Image (cartoon, rainbow, N blue to C red):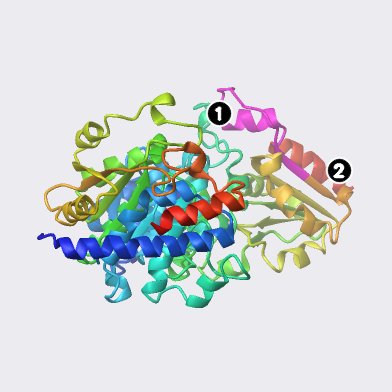
Amino acid sequence: MQVDSKKIGDMEKEGKQIRLKLFKKLCQVQEGHPGSILSIFDIVNVLYAGDFIRLDADANLNDSFIMSKGHAAAAQYPFLVRKGLIAEKDWDNWGVCESILRVFGNNRIPGIDVTSGSLGHGVGIGAGMALANRMENNDASAWIVISEGELYEGSTWEALLFVAHHNLTSVKIILDVNRNMILGRPEDCVGLESLDAKMQAFNFDTLRIDGHAYPDIFAGLTFLNEATEKPRVLIADTIKGKGVSFMEDQAASHYWGNLSEEQMAQMIKDLSQ
Amino acid sequence: MNFQRDAFISTINDLALTNKQIVFLSADFGAPALDRLRVTVPDQFFHLGISEQNLIDVAIGLALKGKIVTTYAMAPFISLRCAEQHKIAAMMELPIINLIAGVGLGYANAGPTHYATEDFALALNTIGSTVITTADAPTAAACAKHLIEHPKFCFVRMDRAQGQDLSDVTPSSFETGYRTFYSGKKIAIVSHGYMVLKMHNMLEQNQNMSASVTIFDVFRSKPIPSMLHKDLSEFDHIIIIDEQIEKSSLGLHLLPELMKSHQSSQIHRFHLSEAFMFGNDGRESLIKEAGIEEDVIAQLIADLST
């Protein structure tokens, strides 16, 4: 696919505005998982704004999007508001009064296809969706964002085996590698690398990208979209807390915690740049 | 003498021939009827290997896209191994029929890893679930038809062994939720699954006992059948028995409902002890070891009848 650099530039610029809007909202909500949202936000932006996720067809023909790392589901909300799926009222009310929105996504929220929060389910659920689509001769895709932390769940590997065996090329897996879990780095816990080799050994084609470089993201999602021979995994190296000076690459940015007024002001300032 | 699992799967198979929304998943668990299903509707069957957690996740994905999914594996593993997956499926109110084969001590001599003596608690405590425990093949077949006609998230618990067919059951019976055998007026034996067969056989062999006893086969234990309490309120004593540990027992499940009409002294609960059982002299030996064999129940009935 030809990459239109102006379009990508515009997407990045507008994405920053959307990200700022999201974090102003999170400052009202005062809970959630800012570091994880920021590590995946740029990719989510391109998925929606780049129309990689097909959302305009008949509901049954639409693509599905599974935010398997459910703690980052809020990254989807501003895009679903823009698509007209989430009501403006629910967005406005979130953190203020009753709203359908939650820190973790659930499928009662329009546009959220799968209830998530518990880790390690996304690939298997996406595989089931892809099987159903195949049975119906439906070419819809199941886009799945998983975190590297979910690779500690055995069910993820069970599902990867299954996807590869059935050659479910409509399963499009994005692996967010931000190298931070709640208690620190994976390599200090149980090492995960080399992820490329592991996925290839499971019979996936892989591409590894900088998950914040828009041309890379665009190329990576195109790589997933063009899978025909084998299912593919896009491994995205990202930065937890990307864009917020005191959160970047910090495990502690996983939770909102007790951010002070000064920190929230700094966050908004950083994200405004 | 028929297998419940074969009756259930055969019915699913027959319906799947014309209903392409029906999908069957197995975690490397077989049955003669499944051999036929794999041949007659191969595009609607998937063998996932021994991966119960993925089995349920895949079922969730299929169900989200409109399929009616039956999952099938050995009872201890398709229950506890994937408890959280069941929770998520139930949360999304998906039409997934979890076929739990070999409950209780059905895998006697295999040892405690293979006993499902606490699975009923998991099924009951999965929010929004329907829980069915079949005692014979006609019930299993009717259950399959009912669930395809009224898809919902449910657990269908059944025995692995061949057993006697007790009576015909229709799919509409699942609206009622139970059936009765004998018509004594004094003592009700309330059970489900394998223990229904044992109690039925006990009364067959002790016809004088049957004059005072009615057996209630509560095949739909959740939601608790609406008429059960009223029907049981007419009995002086209620004996509740199944092959689960106490915290997972039918007796504990029904107790709050029954306490509305009976004193605790009128309710006699029988269940397994909370212990892993390592004996290898067969199922009946384990049941005797647990103190829930027919002789004990018969003696209690004799005592209560005098």
Quadrant location of the C terminus of chain A?
bottom left
Q: Is residue B235 left or right of residue B182?
A: right
| Residue B136: % across, % down | 52, 52
**Does A186 sit above or below residue A173?**
above
**Magenta stretch contains residue A209:** no
How many marks are shown on the rendered structure? 2
**Does A57 sit above or below residue B112?**
below
Q: Is residue B165 visible?
A: no
| Residue B214: % across, % down | 73, 57
**Identity of the amino acid at label 2?**
Asp
- Give the residues in magenta: B269-292
The tag earlier along the polypeptide, 2 or 1, is 1
Q: What SS does tag 2 mark?
A: helix
**Does A114 sit above or below residue A91?**
above
| Disc 2: which residue | B303
Mark in the foreground, 2 or 1: 1
| Disc 1: which residue | B112
Q: Nearer the viewer, residue B226 or B204?
A: B226
| Residue B176: % across, % down | 62, 68
Would you identify the image quadrant in which residue B69 lies? Answer: bottom left
Q: Are marks 2 and 1 on the same chain?
A: yes
